[in-house]
Image (tube, coloured by chain):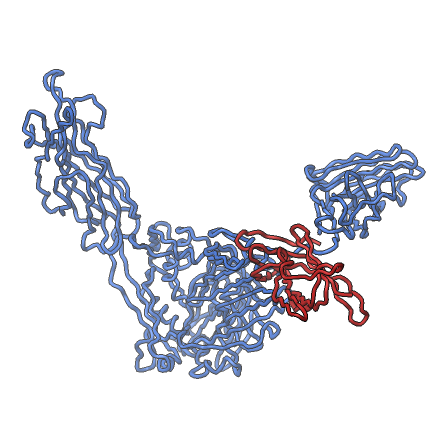
Amino acid sequence: MTFSDGTFDANIWTPYTQSINTGQVTASRKATGGNPGACIEASFDCPGNNDQALLFYMYQNAVHDPATQGAILSVQRSTDVYLVTHTGSLGPGPFGVVVGVAAMQGGKLYFADDGVSGPETGEWRTVTGTSVSASSFRTLVDPNDHPDFTESGQPVTFGFFSQVITAGGSIQIIARLDNWQLELLTALPDVPALEAPVTVHLGESLNGVFADPSVDVSFFQNVDLEVGSVHELGDQLGGGSWYRFAIRDRSRQGGIIAYTGEALLTRLSRARPRESLVLVAGEGGVPNPLDLRECLARFLAFYGVPHDPDLPPFFLRTSSGLVVPTAQAFVIQPNQESPESIFEWLERFFGPFRGYTWRADELDRLVVRPPAWIETFGMRFHLYKATVFVNRTTLTYPWPWQEARAPTLEYTITVDGQTHMGTTEALTPGAPVQVVEGGLTFTITWAADGATLTVRLTDPSLFAPLFDAVFSAKPTGEAAAALTFTSADLGPDEAETSTADSVFNQAVIRVRKRTFEADQQLMQPAALILRSPTQLAAGLFGANTPYGPMAWAPDTPENFLELANEHGQSGTWFWPVADEIVIKPGGNVTLTLDIEEWAEQWRPESSTSTPHAAAANVNSYVEEVTLPASGAEVKLLDFQFPRQTSDFAPSPYGARGSLYGRWRGGDEPGVELRIANARFAEFGYLAESGIFGQTVYFLWGVQLKLNGSGIVWTVGPLETHRFGFARSDDGTWEGGAVVPGLAQSQALFPDRAYEAPELPYEVDAATALAIARGIVEENHVPKVVYQLPLVPAREDGYAYHPRHLGGAAIVQPLGVSGRITAHDYTESHSPAGSTSALTVDVEVGQALPDTPAAPTGRRYGRAVYGVTTYHPTEEA
Amino acid sequence: MDPVITFERVSDAAQLQVFGDAEFTRDQVGNLTVTWSDPLKARAPATRLTRGDFAGFVSEGVEQHRNRAAAYLVITDPGGALLKVTWQEIDPWAGTLLEAQELYGAAMLVNTSASIQRDGISLIVYRADYRFQRGAGLLEQRPSP
């Protein structure tokens, strides 16, 4: 048991002083001047012979009860001491301040002299005392009075003391004390804690590009956690957190409570926002060109998804280099009736980018990890000059790590049949590096902000020799470096699987073109006519006479869609979007309402079936209101119904009514109009001859002409881009692509097409085809997956941490490198013993020749797979 | 000279002491199995120990668990007890009692037999730092040493 303190809060520390003869001591806490921060400064003054002054500082938190917490075997402390001044007839001899452990039991102060601070001044010294037991303690007056540290002893409070003694002279000392620490060695360990888990199971597996952890833990019944509460699970050995999760299920059985947790991605699959997000390149502050990282950053910020702001750029690799798609527009337009979840949007968004990893980190934020192959294979720049006109002399790609990890480039340059190879140093942002080989000079520039990497032939003149150059850039630095498993890390019985299910040798990408125009007519103009139904005139003793219905019977205006033309004062009507408008995302609908209010007079002496005076248009007005297309109902207006009676009675006798609107999306979009809270009748005193008149009734009717406008998206046809379906006579695929091995892959694994859902971003035809090609080239070989049981061989346990998921891994004993796609950890404890197991899945990206992973690839080309992606000659 | 075993309830320190020829077996978990032949609950005058004497000391429906911190927990039906069991085995060579051993746990009777020739009782003490009682949610803990 250890106690320590360096702040000396007056609420926790209690000082006492004792002295013999004329010795004196005063002490106070100083906020500064410690080692560092606060300290205690003690001022001793012992002017006479055989003077003693004693200062005790007792730490109220350091209380040990031997009866319940076990007997104390020994005590050891350490204190930092600083002598400020040291004067008097005795100084500066080998005298100093005595410091040691103080104990208080039953109101009596004991101290044990376990060390002396020397006479040096102006220097902090850490003085560690020797280990002392009860017999070393004494009181000032009686050296044989010891505290009782056995189980029958009373509770003991510990602290420190400081003492100055004179013998044949005077001494004045000012000393400072700081960083007190005390260690108690008690008889036996406590009863082991009941709070530790009985079983733990953690699993995380990449499903497509997303990984969601499954967290299952069980405890004894005293650990009773509420469903919905948030907890963290971490590493007892290495420290640090692994997951933050909310408890979703709790089940108690046989004295054990089992909990299942859920993390961010599960939550995102339930979050179904209705708000639209529309980004158009170059409009409203959106950059042009619009890259997918920008789209994602704005998407996550807009929908409030917690995420690591360090998002990577998005690209796909093909044999002719990287495809970095840029979008002309990005449209998230939820179905208002059954909105898609954020997770579904992300899946649609990033399904094609199969090398990336999306997971929730230990802070439960979304983290996107760039593809692991950049770490193992490197990002490849291919420059060449095959003829004067077939050449590529400059290439710029985004760099995923910004300035955090510097790239280093390996190169193979072939000029005039001579091959030159080499490696550059790690680059510095903004400082170009030149590579000179075979008479050619290449300039490699890592942009000053670290965002891009450019390789360029410095002098691409017409007379430059023919060449072929491949540079592959790999990141340096530790931040997320490839995890290397040695044979010590691996348990026995690894399993290797490969499945044709992982193969995609055809890809279909669907893109929809959209154009938008503001202030367009959205809705067919519509009319709604409502007139008062039969009302009751209040009469004496319940003799209520019915009046109406309103006799006014107008026609629906021509060319207007009739929503209603009827007697009534409330109801709901659906006003559909005009036929030719297919879709209306986001923003607002502007409704123009042209309103006429008509009143018809009825009075008691006239017949109850005909009005006294015909209906007249007493009020007309035009309102323009904005209806947000969010699916929520808003109040558009209150009808005015100006008073027709001269009654001074309050408004309940007047007519009233409100109009509400709600945008309804879905397959049949439109506006739901609702009139409610309405009474289309007015009752009051009408002065007709001076102040003389009588009680009359007015029945009201309204005629609404409605028009709606807003931003119109005209949605073009769905364009489908296919790759891997057509091959020309010269063996090239769509777009003239040379993909060795693809034909063999299709022969071996027929009908393996990746059908991308409609992309939420709009790209041009060339980019769409390149995305399709990228998917095919990354996936046309079956992935070999190694399931590796790991053993905790490292100093702090397993080599693997959950944050490594999706990252690159090198398995030395098997000679393979790839990326980690899953992990599964179990731990269980029973009276018979404890077991724990960790398995990780490594998807092999590249197998070294003549290693166990090689054969599957070699079937129609491990080498071919290599050629497809990395060999320098496929484009010649 | 016979081995002696003492069962002491942690909750109220009530004791039951048993004398008589006994066989002690401990398994790898630390659970103790005791098998008596002709056990006595008092020596002079000699009083025979019967199953009923264990009432209040033994538990039923014992389930034993352990967690990562190596805390042993038994879950018992209502009416059980967490016991401090102290016993002295006999050294068959020297014919003397060995040093006392101690174990916290919940005891469960597994077998009693009686015949004209002899009677016998056997019982298992499940090692436990804690006893949790079904239903009531009562938790007993062995004292810290």
Q: Is residue A179 above or below residue B19?
A: above
Q: Quadrant of residue A813?
A: bottom right
Query: Residue B78: x, y in percent?
Result: 56, 55
Q: Residue at x 45, y 72 (%)?
A: A382
Residue A692 located left or right of residue A240: left
The colour chain A appears in is blue
Q: How many numbered marks are there? A: 0
For the residue pair A552 and B138, the one nearer the viewer reads as B138
Figure chain in red: B
Query: Residue B23: x, y in percent?
Result: 70, 69
Q: Residue at x 89, y 40 (%)?
A: A91
Q: Is residue A162 above or below residue A293?
A: above
Q: Residue at x 43, y 58 (%)?
A: A265
Residue A716 located left or right of residue A74: left
For the question of whether residue A377 can be seen, the reply is no
For the residue pair A389 and B46, the one nearer the viewer reads as B46
- Quarter of the image containing the C terminus of chain B? bottom right
Residue A760 located left or right of residue A434: left
- Quarter of the image containing the N terminus of chain B? bottom right
